[in-house]
Amino acid sequence: MRAAVILVCFFVSGVSLAQKKVASVDISNPVAIACVDRPGDLYVIMTNGETVKFDKNGKQIGTKKFKTVPTIFDPKDGTRAFAYARETQTVESITPDLSYSDTSPLHPEFAVSAWLVCPSKNEFWILDGADFSLKKTRDKGTAIAYEAVFKKENGPSYMREYLNFLFVIDNGIHILNNLGKEIRILNSSPDYFSFLGEEIYFPSGRSSLQLIDLYTTDKREISLPHEAKFAFLTDERMILINDRSVEFFEFVP
């Protein structure tokens, strides 16, 4: 039976907390994936595979070209980014300036066809495409430590680990513990989500973000200066992304 999310506090900010625009950057192609790492740098992957990394002031740090848009891209803590390509069943570890990467095939004995793969420290979470079971590796990705049941609803579209929780988008955001056991479900199916401290956040329409504390389940909402395809929060910035532009605003959490 689904666990319900209890929202013990609700707060809506009617005005944007971003007061001053720091920078605006034009980009050349529509955006397929965008995300921020824990230090607050931004990664933008365009539909042609072109990838650009920016610092908090909109300065370009590095570029990379993927052959195809990754199925999963996780910037992690800023030291090594991670990418998974379902088409080739390969994982990729990428340097902070995007100048070099190591690509290796996922062990075929782990999954006939892995649907999603995301990093977990020195290991991987694997969502098996055959039966949509969850598998956690051990020994630096060379063996399976344990498996867990994941009750697929539609087609899981995204998976990421944070603070020893695993998050999967599939007709809601499923929150699982580090053994793959479901704790609760957030009844929203956004295109993306990210984290600010102990809060998960995701779009509420195109003009605001909803934030939920992972431990207390307190809820709040932050308005954006204007509509955006992607919006991210860091300790210092609110970042708005549309298909041809990226804007950086001052932000106080």
Image (cartoon, helix red, strand yellow):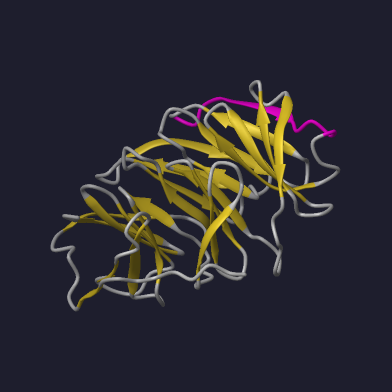
From the top left corner, tell me how far across and down residue 5 is, in percent.
44, 69
Predominant SS of the magenta segment: loop
88 displayed left or right of 158: right
> Is residue 209 visible to the viewer in this orientation of the structure?
yes
In the displayed structure image, the side of residue 86 where residue 246 appears, left or right: left
Q: Within the magenta stretch, is there residue 148?
A: no
Report the quarter where the C terminus lies: bottom left
Image label count: 0
Above-or-below relation of 235 to 188? above
For the point 46% across and 37% down, which residue is it?
76
Q: What residue appears at the point 55 percent right and 25 percent down from the top-left corner?
A: 100
Q: Nearer the viewer, residue 187 or 215?
A: 215
Farthest residue to the top: give it.
139
**Was residue 101 drawn as part of the magenta stretch in this picture?**
yes
**Residue drawn at point x = 34 percent, y = 68 percent:** 209
The picture places residue 4, in percent across and down from the top left corner, at 49, 71
Q: Quadrant of the N terminus?
A: bottom right
Q: Position of residue 112 (x, y in %)?
A: 86, 43
Residue 178, quarter of picture: top right
Name the residue furthest front. Answer: 1
First to last magenta residue range = 97-109
The residue lying toward the viewer, choosing from 124 and 101, is 124
Identify the residue at horizontal 51%, vertical 62% (top origin): 184
Question: Residue 31: in sight, yes or no?
Answer: no
In front: 169, or 68?
Answer: 169
